[in-house]
Image: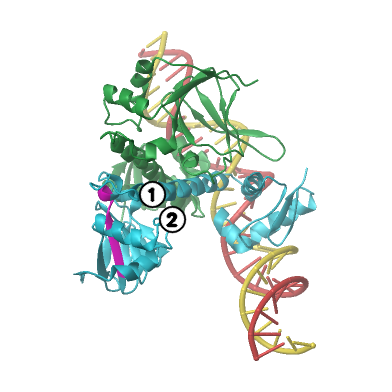
Chain colours: A green, B cyan, C yellow, D red
DNA sequence: TTCCTTTCGTTGTAATTGCAACATAATTAT
DNA sequence: ATAATTATGTTGCAATTACAACGAAAGGAA
């Protein structure tokens, strides 16, 4: 059963958590406090398995986990539910959907433990506040930054994954890394398993492909250090 | 050779184009004109093959195609260039990178024909303007909407594509469509080839998979109308 | 209608991949 | 140093897929 508790929380505790998030990046604690007031941010507490957002609905608030953890799940037509993300303290959710009431949630958000969520109305973030506080625009910029960053990551990942063979996927990724490092020699932030997961391929098949590429003199590598040859 | 021409354009013509774009959605022509002035938007003309944005650089302006067309290309380490997008009149580019000077362009933008680009400084969009014009926030909202929309599309596509078999990819997609239509019967906006491209699989292999699923009574379909059974 | 074009389904084959199982190397803990 | 754990490489096989080629069906145009 869903149980909600709405109460005035100690916002100072929450501030400690928020100042480590991307949304409140570059904003000091006192200012965070005043922004929270200005935005009329509210917290709600949930028990394990309580539904925070329901698939099929629309929302107008973004959520930030300030205690406990939550799962983002998708239920298929047969009722099988699938965890597609696990979010912990400091993580933000709902931002892509809260912005537009035409966006229907394709997933549900469920408390995976006793947790506390800070909600902020999207409208209040996006509209200049009455007092026209100068830090509002920093918050706004941080928000757009979060979107842009995720967009860049998703787009480039998509480019790699849509290639048809493991070889192509890998080289697509390595080429991008090479470009970003402006060098044919660079390190990547993944181990083999993580790289395989990122490229959505089997780890051993990836290892095998890498070996062949090394054998053919196309790449060289040791652990997570790579060199593109030719 | 790169040839730039900067001149005062007939902004009224451009307004006709802009009012059909997502960025200037819900903004009428006169207001667009005043926004363009407020943002000090500038146009530049390019000849075919001129470089508009160079990979490896950083940018602080978004671009909107108002004449001709452009290509987004990625060059690999061997110098082979790959067209990854073709943009036409009304299309926006650079928005994910202009927001943050730490974001290095992994792609180049090149004129694929004689073209004219409208540039708007991202800072001017994101910071409240001095005259605090009321439509600035609409523009801002439209921008964030563009980000959010693309995010949603990319995220769900990613979810489907990362599945390992064609069957799983297809069912993942169909389940989502079913959820969005809130029905087990629905139409999709793709023909077979487009669906195959979207899921990054071979068309005939997709057809074959679909036939088997129909045979096994898991789905039913006719052209682009589908029904999930059980 | 008839012709033409596009879309879709089917089939066979070669190639690729996932998977499991194991070997080896590297890292960490004791 | 030794043991335990983790990361990486290798191999064979079964399953899946891409690809090409073809034919049927559907839709449009003359």
The image quadrant of residue D1 is top left
Task: Give above or below for D3 relative to A89.
Answer: above
| Subunit of label 1 | B
The location of residue B193, given as percent across then percent down, is 60, 63
Q: Is residue B81 magenta?
A: no
Secondary structure at numbered mark 2: loop
On whether disc 1 and disc 2 are found on a single subunit, the reply is yes
Front-most of B127 and B214? B127
Residue at 56%, 22% in the rendered image: A112
Could you give the CA–CA distance between mark 1 and mark 2, rounded to whole angstroms? Answer: 8 Å
For residue B26, which numbered disc appears in the image? Answer: 2
Asked if disc 1 and disc 2 are in contact, CB closer than 8 Å, the reply is: yes
Q: Which residues are magenta?
A: B116-124
Report the quarter where the N terminus of chain A lies: top right
The location of residue B38, given as percent across then percent down, is 25, 55
The location of residue A10, given as percent across then percent down, is 39, 14
The location of residue D12, given as percent across then percent down, is 61, 43
Secondary structure at numbered mark 1: helix
Left-right relation of A150 to A33: right
Left-right relation of B20 to A129: right
Task: Give above or below for D5 relative to B58.
Answer: above
For residue B138, which numbered disc appears in the image? Answer: 1
């Amino acid at each position: 059963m869903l149980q909600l508790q709405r109460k005035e929380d100690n916002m100072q505790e929450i501030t400690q958590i928020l100042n480590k998030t991307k949304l409140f990046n570059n904003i000091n604690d006192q200012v965070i406090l005043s922004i929270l007031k200005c935005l009329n941010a509210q917290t709600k507490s949930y028990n394990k398995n309580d539904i925070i957002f329901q698939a099929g609905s629309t929302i107008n608030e973004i959520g930030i986990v300030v205690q406990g953890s939550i799962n983002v799940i998708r239920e298929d037509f047969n009722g099988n539910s699938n965890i597609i993300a696990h979010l912990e303290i400091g993580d933000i959710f709902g931002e892509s959907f809260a912005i537009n009431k035409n966006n229907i949630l394709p997933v549900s958000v469920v408390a995976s433990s006793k947790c506390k969520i800070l909600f902020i109305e999207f409208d209040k973030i996006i509209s200049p506040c009455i007092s026209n506080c100068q830090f509002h625009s920093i918050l706004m910029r941080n928000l757009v930054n979060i979107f842009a960053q995720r967009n860049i990551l998703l787009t480039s990942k998509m480019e790699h994954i849509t290639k048809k063979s493991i070889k192509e996927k890998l080289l697509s990724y390595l080429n991008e890394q090479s470009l970003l490092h402006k060098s044919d020699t660079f390190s990547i932030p993944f181990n083999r398993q993580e790289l395989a997961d990122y490229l959505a391929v089997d780890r051993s098949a990836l290892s095998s492909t890498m070996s062949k590429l090394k054998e053919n003199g196309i790449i060289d590598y040791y652990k997570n250090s790579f060199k593109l040859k030719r």
